[in-house]
Amino acid sequence: MTAASIAWTTSVLVIVVASVLLTVLVRQRDRARDELARTDPLTGLGNRRALVESGEPLLASGRGLGLLLLDLDGFKDVNDTLGHAAGDEVLVQVARVLTATVGDRGPVTRLGGDEFAVLVPAPGPGDDLEVVAKRLLAALSVGSFHAGVVPIDLQGSIGIAVAGVDGNSLGELLQHADIAMYAAKRSRVGVLRYDAASDPHSAGGLELLGQLRGAMDADQLELHYQPKVSGDGSRLVGFEALVRWNHPSRGFLLPADFLPFVERTNLIHPLTRWVLITALRQAATWRAQGVDVSMSVNISAVTLDAGLLGVVEEALALTRWTPSALVLEITETAVINDPEGARVTVAKLRERGIRVSVDDFGAGSTSLGHLRGLAVHELKIDRQFVSEMVAHPEDEVIVSSVIALAHQLGLVVVAEGVETLASADRLCALGCDELQGFFFARPLPAEKALAWARTEGMTGAAVELR
């Protein structure tokens, strides 16, 4: 072989090798780019694209698929208080805990913000998915999270959707798991399976909403009234109005059966108006009959805006009710979701002489620090601490601390969920201002509430404590 042919052969080999290497490098680059496109850069978990690419083949296989959608409760406080860098640090830790807890049951992905998803291929009975979900929440509650040296306590809410039952595409599963997750967050139950009957966008939900529009005119809605008594249990101080729906085919529906998805529609506004006017008319009637106490009405976070004062003013004018004898109970969610908006609205209500109460205090992420600058009059300690305080000393410590700190802020403290004489007695000893619960009376129809007030509430015969 001549030198020229050797050189030519060598050149060809170099070109071939270079071409192969270039092809390999291009493929490696493309694979790397593809992997980056499927990966959440913060946590290293898969992202929404990875979820779709993992889920679609599983759906097509027909082997079964469950989707768990998890959102951290009150995580916005971490970012707002400590900064987004601290929040990112905590999210990385959360990703590790979720991955370790799920194990090989399915891939964990981060959809964005503080929202994570878990795909569970070929799930067993529905309870299996709930077990996985509860394990995830338990892992969060005992996890050692921190931002720098600051310890962080985390809770979460999870919605569950099952392929073939709750949706036939990944988009439907995500949408329905999201609806279930927000319902779990509102009701503070931790985990909820999607229920089409509670979905305002489902056929059943739309039908129920349509029926509710006529229920107010058809006298299917009614209010029941639960007494609030003085801290020593000796006298009635007020009633809380609670809506009920006598549905023509589904029977007696409690608020949890229809309010969560009514809040996702504009129907919540006329319903709030109806409850306010009906409750104050009843209170005015009782006042004329000699029962002169305050009336408490629950206000959804959705309606705590600039338009609320106009609705309240209308109800006061129509019923000629005294503003200072009206208590509007707002949830922690209303305070957390829009602190500035809540502050402005509450300030206007207070200027009008209306009292405002923070309901279910301690159930969510609100601390007494959130109440600075919020002109509320009252705190209602959540029933989860009150009902078990005698059996669990740590709950009594929490209740005692809330009462003491609230009193320092000049707030009235109400304990809800008082179910035994022992807990009522302890609350009295701790200086709680007002008590409410089944121990005194369940929510009662108007005529029975009046009878209770006359026989027990107004005669000093409710319950003499200590």
Image: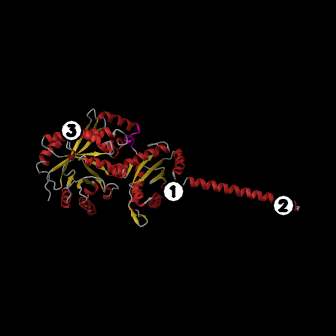
Proximity of marks 1 and 3: CB atoms separated by less than 8 Å: no
**Residue 288 at x, y percent in the picture:** 14, 40
Q: Which of 7 and 343 is in front in this view?
A: 343
For image coordinates 12% across by 45% down, the residue present is 454
For image coordinates 56% across by 52% down, the residue present is 37
| Residue at the disc numbered 3 | 319
**Residue 111 at x, y percent in the picture:** 48, 51
Question: Which residues are the magenta region?
Answer: 195-202
Q: How far apart are marks 2 and 3 (CA)?
A: 105 Å
| Dot 2 or dot 1, earlier in sequence | 2
Give the residue type that dot 3 points to.
Thr
**Rendering quarter of residue 198:** top left
Q: Residue 45 carries which label?
A: 1
Q: Distance between the residues labelled 2 and 1?
A: 51 Å
Main SS of residues in magenta? loop
Res 196 seen here: yes
Give the residue type that dot 2 points to.
Ala
**Rendering quarter of residue 320:** top left
Q: Which mark is residue 7?
A: 2
Quick one: SS at disc 2? helix
Quick one: SS at disc 3? helix
Q: Nearer the viewer, residue 239 or 312?
A: 312
**Residue 54 at x, y percent in the picture:** 53, 50
- Where is 193 relative to 394, above or below? above
Q: Nearer the viewer, residue 314 or 25?
A: 314
For image coordinates 23% across by 57% down, the residue present is 410
Camera-side mark, 2 or 3: 3
